[in-house]
Amino acid sequence: MRAVVCRTFAPLDQLVIEERPSPELAPNQVRVAVTAAGVNFVDALIVQGLYQIKPPLPFTPGGESVGQIVEIGALVADRAVGQRVLVTSGAGAFATELVIGARNTLVLPDSLTDGQAATFMQSYGTAWFALVERARLQAGQWLLVLGAGGGVGLGAVDVGRALGLNVIAAASSADKRALAQSRGAVAVIDSSTEDVKARAKELSGGDGVDAVYDPIGGTVGEQCLRSLRDDGQFLVIGFASGDIPQLPANQVLLRNRRVTGVEWGGWVLKHPEENQRMVQQILAKIVAGELDPVEPTSYAFEDAATALADQQNRRVVGKAVLVVAPTDAG
């Protein structure tokens, strides 16, 4: 098998690809021949040591992959050789083979391509957890999504539309705004030239939006707190800009606004059964055609560093995926 390896926290071009022996298979595990691995913004930060979590070195990045089960352990009863599965590994996804607990795999419907399947979970899990479990938004309400051209933002646009929300998508390029509109945004804002706060209030009728979905942070997030109407919610998703927004407490107080933290990954560890039900709800809506994850930009397995750099530098519209050629597997 082959794996992308980070030996030291360093620039992305320091990643290497190594040949490794296939791991032993425990009784409760399955062996998966990987066909695609999702590339997320956070992966680039982790490799460079810029994220709050720093895994022990050396390590293989990536947390989401898709492949075919080629072997099952003696105690595995609910998986079979030949099944196509999503693997949520937390780390190690940038490899041509994975050995993992069967419960960390999810059998996939045929309606998802390998690329969609390898890139939807983080974005859609976060969006569903944020909008349904945390914010409890209702059909007809207004949602402003910042960074709507990236994978996390697009997931929120799609989930918001499926929930009957009026979604306003803010993104920095025409391609990204067009993609957000294709996923159901009722209006778009050019975040590179327009006043996002003022335009969002105007588009939502003048009083403000019901919720702001912010995976970006920084000054735009700070400003968009003021785009909320009375009792509106500011959903803290992440800080892709690298800057934590300094949210003015007086603006929260004066209009009874709420700031809501959204940390889906941590919640999953404490509520695995609830998360399983939530993921099944998401998959059911995908199968029914009510949700439509984007087809990602594909990179060869050998181009992992380029894929990570393009993601970090916002050159990717939507999502990115590493594709494992059949000759590389195993």
Image: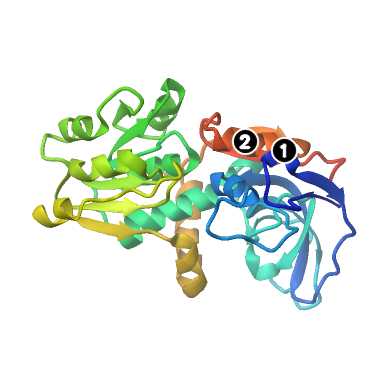
Indicate the secondary structure of the residue bearing disc 1: helix
Is the C-beta separation of discs 2 and 1 under 8 Å?
yes
Residue at image position (81%, 76%) is 74
Residue 159, above or below 320: below
Tell me residue 298's x, y (percent).
Answer: 66, 33
- Residues 112 and 275: in front is 275
Amino acid carrying mark 2 in the image: Ala
Name the residue at 23% across, 53% down: 233
Frontmost residue, 16 versus 49: 49
Crowd band around label 2 with a 10 angstrom C-alpha radius: few (<14), some (14–19), many (20+):
some
Would you name the residue on which mark 1 appears? Answer: 13
Determine whether, in the image, residue 291 is placed left or right of residue 120: left
Mark 2 or mark 1: name the one nearer the start of the chain: 1
Q: Position of residue 273 (x, y in %)?
A: 49, 73
**Front tag of 2 and 1:** 1
Quadrant of residue 297 in the image?
top right
Q: Report which residue position mark 2 lands on.
A: 309
Say if residue 129 shows up in the picture.
yes
Locate residue 32 relative to residue 65 in the image: left or right.
right
Question: Going 28% across and 46% down the picture, which residue do you hit?
Answer: 212
Residue type marked 1: Asp
Say above or below: 103 vs 114. below
- Residue 161 appearing in the image: no
Q: Position of residue 120 (x, y in %)?
A: 54, 47
Give the alpha-carbon distance from disc 2 to disc 1, as whole Å.
9 Å
Q: Is residue 121 left or right of residue 267?
A: right
